[in-house]
Image (tube, rainbow, N blue to C red):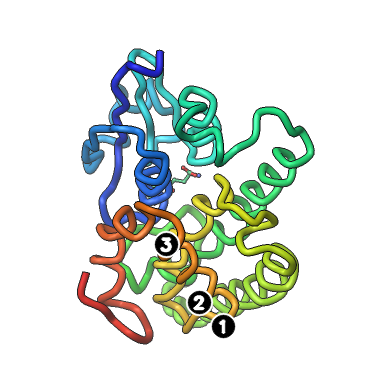
Amino acid sequence: MSEDKVILWTLPPSSNSAVIRTFLLAAEIPFEEKNAWGQTRTPEYIAKFPNNCAPAVEHGDFSVCETAASMRYLAKAFPDKAGKFYPSDNAQKAAKIDMVCDMINTGICNLIPKAAYPTLGFPLYAGDVAAMDESKEHTKASQKAAADAIKEYLENKVVGILLDKTKFLMSDTPTIADFRFAPMLSQIKVTMELPDGIADYLERMEADVPGFADGNKPANEYNSKFWVTNPVDC
Ligand SMILES: N[C@@H](CCC(=O)N[C@@H](CS)C(=O)NCC(=O)O)C(=O)O
């Protein structure tokens, strides 16, 4: 099974796509990347990937989407390479990692589009202030409210709790939770200067996790044009 080819569908400027790209590079799992631009709403794509999103993974004739589910699958399918990022023999550690992934998915990942997408020029979701003609004039205020909530989340929950006693998120070695979270900072930098503890954490990911910096390049290349400080050449 692990000999089957891995295909990673991405939208190259997307930080969600960087989640799986950085994970595969760090695990040294060979893969082919395919651009999903224009395909995510096609019946063929949705039949394989019902969330109509990238990133999405094919492995032989198996397909899976959603970043956290995909990383859990890859950790189990390639235990020698990726098992170190998600334990198979420690239910409590795995539960904490799942908890952090779910927190990021349902917390910060809901706020990022509201805060950053109008600036990045990405489409908004149904019901978002910037997605409706009636409320578009309030986009700036809505972006600020979402960015303030992200900042509070980063300072109080991520730095204050998840990184309080450990180098990575509730762990002294990187786990799938770090791959779920850290690439999203590229989009958060569009809305604010990263709080100190978060900037240090991102530097640690870049320095200590081989492949992490490279896997973020396509998203950074796009997002850095909009970063509030320190735009870099990628
Ligand atoms: N919850 C999903 C989020 C993925 C996501 O939002 N992908 C967006 C790009 S950042 C997408 O592919 N959108 C394409 C579309 O809506 O057609 C995950 O964790 O994989």
Location of mark 3 (residue): 131
Tell me the SS state at disc 2. helix
Residue 61 visible to an observer of this rendering? yes
- In this orientation, which residue lies closer to the viewer: 48 or 174? 174
> According to the image, label 2 marks what residue?
199
Mark 3 CB in 8 Å range of ligand 1? no
Residue type indicated by callout 1? Asp
The CA distance from mark 2 to mark 3 is 31 Å
Residue beneath disc 1? 196
Q: Quadrant of the N terminus?
A: top left
Quadrant where the C terminus sits is bottom left
Would residue 17 be found to the left or right of residue 191 on screen?
left
The mark closer to the camera, 2 or 3, is 2
Q: Residue at x 45, y 78 (%)?
A: 191
User: In front: 138, or 67?
Assistant: 67
In whole angstroms, how far apart are the C-alphas of marks 2 and 1? Answer: 5 Å
Query: Where, by quadrant of the figure, is residue 56 drawn?
Result: top left
Q: Position of residue 169 (x, y in %)?
A: 64, 58
> Would you say residue 134 is visible in this rendering?
no
Could you tell me which secondary element the residue under label 1 belongs to? Answer: helix
